[in-house]
Image (cartoon, rainbow, N blue to C red):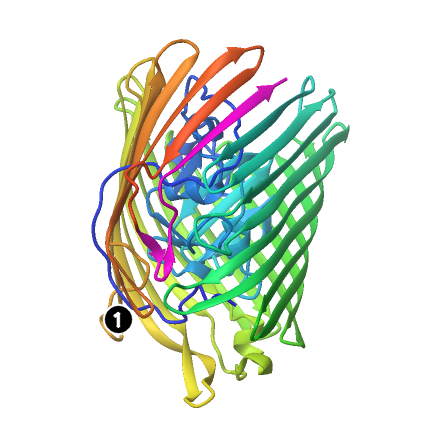
Amino acid sequence: MTQLLPTRPAGWFWMAFGAAAAAIPTIARSQEPASNLDAFVVSASRTPQDPRTVPSTVTSLSLDGLAASQVFDLPTALAEVPGVYISNTGAVGGQSSVYMRGANSDQTLFVVDGIRMNTRSAAYQNFLGQADLGGIDRIEVLRGPQGTLYGSSAVGGVILIDTAHGCGAPSGTLATEAGSFGTYAGSASVQGGTRNLGYSFSASHLTTENDRPGNRDNDWNYSTRIEDQVSDGVVVGATYRGQYGQYQEPGSTLYPSAGDVMSRNDLVTAYAQVHPNASFSSRLTAALHHTDYDYSASWGDSTLRNTRRILDWQNVWDASSNVELVAGTNLEQSRYLAGGGATDDHLSAAYLSGTFKPVADLSVIGGLRYDHFASFGAATTGRFGAAYYVKRTGTTFRSTYGTGFTAPGSDDRYGVAAWGQLPNPTLRPEKSRGWDFGVEQSVLSGRLKVGATYFRTLYKDLFDWETTDFTTYQGMTVNRSRASVKGVELSAEGRLTGRVYATVAYTYLDSRDDVTGARLVRRPRQVADAEIRGNITGAWQAGCGLHVVGDRTDVGGSLGGYTTLRVFTSYDLGSGVVTKFRVENLLDRKYQEVLGYPALPLGAYGSVEWKF
């Protein structure tokens, strides 16, 4: 199995400026709307909130804007967010990891259709490496420790994804694409609804040979939602988001170890929401999440299975025009199969969070959460913060303080004999506490938003690997490291003119292992993005983007910085038909995001999309 995640942080990082990124080719969506100002954000309080008065730092990605930039995959979309660094294991289809505000790759939580989708035992790296943007109508990136609302693994932040809601007259999209490295892709989506019933469906397929021999990727993504208002104040629905991939893993160029990977990720939810009056709503969601990972090589096979059954109950009470309370419980039963052994765990959690508005345009939050795991015991997290919007100047001031934790995985605590991993029943969860302070300013009559945020996070009891036998390399996961992170996020986004749209994002990060003083691995000290796009004529659009990453340390070595440039253009032929063309890594830079895994060189891709 390819080892993506170092069990011990070790290193600091440097360098950058720019925007966009090398995109994994798949399929297109729609054009950019006239305004990109967010109507609301959900992740910061688990209820819709005005982004101008949200204390937490949250970015809501514009799916129409990403489509206009010809960004069609999830890793590339996330890489453009301030404070987020995406590390891809080589080419298309390989594992991808999120390093948010210096947190480790397993310390970011994906929440899909309201359900916590990853744990230490049910990792997200294969899902992210092959995920496109099909069938999604909301992506939010919430930064900083978020244990109070979301529980384990939300140490660095939360990525919220919602499957598309359908409404109105039936409509859809068909698209096909071809390009470098033997890349072919196709997608289809349809959505619509009646007065009470809504539906959406999407499916996409991608195959590519990539650049290295024996590095073929073949994957599918599919999703659906159906929702029905059965009576006044009562809505029931269900979602399904699935992914299946077959990936030829050539291994690291430093230690070649070819193998074949089969990965599968399936999440099914069923929910009912009751809204008996204007001040109260209650939502109950039942979910089944299953992941498979099979790795086959000449030296042997490795199989991982994880099944989680989840019940999530959330209640929202508008106690007054100035007070909103959110309370809920979460129950999870999980079974983890690895190396021929099976382990079980049970989670029960409860939380209470409040949003208070003592005066106009001032929002204050506070909350507390209790999680209990059958495997190791309990963890308590809390947060508080405030935001103030100065209407006269269009300025928002915001600040939060929060705590988070990551629960040990089943393999960490109980061991896997087939891997030479010993049990450690005394293992404690990782813990974090962090705060941030930010300012956001609206300029150019509200067409442009600029922002700056300073953050600092402290970690303790971080997981590390301890080798107990250097002949067989048998060992166990232990609590050893402490780490500290601080940094600055800068951003600007909006329309320079009626025809030209631009974004700039920059992150400076100072991260270190407080035990050794070394930089944390795979955390660039500087990352920057810049993009400009616009309408040359009514039918012709074009743009370019720059992505700059500073030097990093990695397990077993160091990596230099790199810069990639992409250009893209599209032409509307009428009758819903749009042709698109883009070039990734136009400068043909040779670089690696993970040591020993070369990224793709220059590649060109063309597509045709039909909206009906």
The quadrant where residue 371 appears: bottom right
Q: Residue at (39%, 61%) from the top-left corner?
A: 104
Magenta span contains residue 598:
yes
| Residue at disc 1, secondary structure | loop
Q: Main secondary structure of the magenta part?
A: strand
State which quadrant residue 433 falls in.
Answer: bottom left
Can I make out residue 223 in this image? Answer: yes
Residue 558 in picture, x, y percent from top left: 26, 63
Q: Residue furthest right?
A: 230
- Label 1, on which residue? 514
Q: Vertical placement of 379 versus 52: above or below?
A: below
- 4 is higher (above) or lower (below) than 51: below
- Seen at 54% across and 64% down, the residue is 259
Q: List x then y, in percent, for residue 460.
A: 36, 70
> In front: 279, or 334?
334
Q: Is residue 71 magenta?
A: no
Q: Relative to 350, is 121 above or below?
A: below
Is residue 234 depicted above or below 384 in this figure? above
Nearer the observer, 305 or 208: 208
Q: Amino acid at mark 1?
A: Asp
In the rendered view of the protein, which quadrant contains the C terminus? top right
Query: Residue at horizontal 52%, vertical 33%?
Result: 178
Find the magenta span and give its range: 591-612
Residue 326 located left or right of residue 333: left
Q: Residue at x 55, y 45 (%)?
A: 326
